[in-house]
Amino acid sequence: MRLEGLDLARFLAFVGMVIVNFKIVMGAGDDGGALSVFTAALEGRAAATFVVLAGIGLGLSALRGDQVRTVSVSLARAAFLLLIGLLNTLVFPADILHYYAFYFLFGVFLLPLRTRSLVAVIIMLNVFFLAMILVLDYDKGWNWDDLSYTGFWTPAGFVRNLFFNGWHPVFPWLGFLLFGIVLGRMSLSVRVTQYRLMMFGSVAIIVAEVSCHFLSASLASIDPELAVLATTEPVPPMPLYTLAGIGAASLVIGFCLRIAGWFDRIGLLRLVAPAGRQTLTLYIAHILLGMGTLEALGMIGGQTLLTAVVSAAIFCLFALVYALLWSRWFKRGPIEALMRRVAG
């Protein structure tokens, strides 16, 4: 049975990513108002939810099929994502797809681990990243004024960006995929599980934010530079950020699974689900078409936060309509179909 609530969650995560990315490329700063709070809450959380959902898909495929096929298909798709992700990086340096390739590469070989072991690996990823940031230069390669990264296309720079100080480094972002695998082993269609996910997610977010508030103040009193160790911001992705990201993903996924039946009864799910099944296509489209249109209109940089959010909303509305129309004739989105054709 297909869990259509996951399609709803994918679409919501996609909308969050579009808002965040449009905000970045349009140079929209925070104004301290409610809209700033809303967009700040999406930063890093929407992308983390996206990765967790990918982990759920990987976990479910492992349960439904044989391990050998799951590994071979996942590795082929990882190669596909690496190729289109690197091409996409030429246009949008904050691309997440080439990171996805490595999440799948490592994640598929960790699939046989028991749930407790996967949780232990998630913790170890965060501990290791914390150790790395204490002994390595996190700023190396970055120009924070224009968010450019020097040396990305060199072997050393690529590895550094991929594993340590890129937008979505393997340490600790691989943990989101592993958490998704853990969720994929649960009875997600059961109401109790859905409520538990929402409860866990809410508690995790509260614990992360409260801990950030008190720990950052305590660490800052020792050395102002130490306050970053307790941040819940996505850059750098410290342990409390991982906890907040896991919490946000759990809350959104549990909520979407719970309301999917009601959405279906009132006819909304059939409008949203097709877009949730084409998020790879839509992700690339929001960069090539969405940001391309912004550039053509002279809206790259210097825009207000409201303009960025409205622009993102307009694009997502067009994406929703496109996906609905496309689904009338085709089962999969164009990029999803291409990936399935060349990678299984």
Image: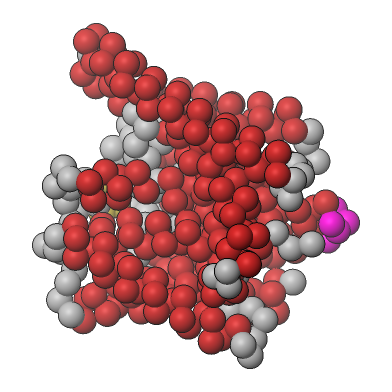
User: Residue 145: where, in percent of width, then height?
Assistant: 16, 48
User: Residue 120: where, in percent of width, then height?
Assistant: 66, 26
Q: Is residue 329 left or right of residue 279?
A: right
Compared with residue 293, is residue 94 higher up or lower down, i.e. above or below? above
Examine the image and state in which quarter residue 125 appears: top right
Of residue 259 and residue 229, the one placed in the foreground of this image is: 259
Q: Is residue 209 left or right of residue 173?
A: left
- Residue extending farthest to the bottom is 329
Compared with residue 306, is residue 239 higher up or lower down, i.e. above or below? above
Of residue 319 and residue 302, the one placed in the foreground of this image is: 319
User: Residue 69: where, in percent of width, then height?
Assistant: 83, 61
Let me know if residue 79 appears in the view. Answer: no
- Residue extending farthest to the front is 266
Residue 144 drawn in magenta: no
Examine the image and state in which quarter residue 138 appears: top left
User: Residue 211: where, in percent of width, then height?
Assistant: 39, 20
Compared with residue 42, is residue 95 higher up or lower down, i.e. above or below? below
- Residue extending farthest to the left is 302
Examine the image and state in which quarter residue 308 appears: bottom left
User: What span is colored magenta in the figure?
Assistant: 64-69
Name the dominant secondary structure of the magenta segment. helix
Point 63% across, 39% down: residue: 195
Point 37% across, 48% down: residue: 42
Number of marks in the rendered image: 0
- Location of the N terminus by quadrant is bottom right
Residue 68 drawn in magenta: yes
Point 57% across, 39% down: residue: 198
- Residue extending farthest to the top is 222
How was the colour assigned to the protein in this rendering? secondary structure
Let me know if residue 131 appears in the view. Answer: yes
Q: Is residue 290 left or right of residue 242?
A: left
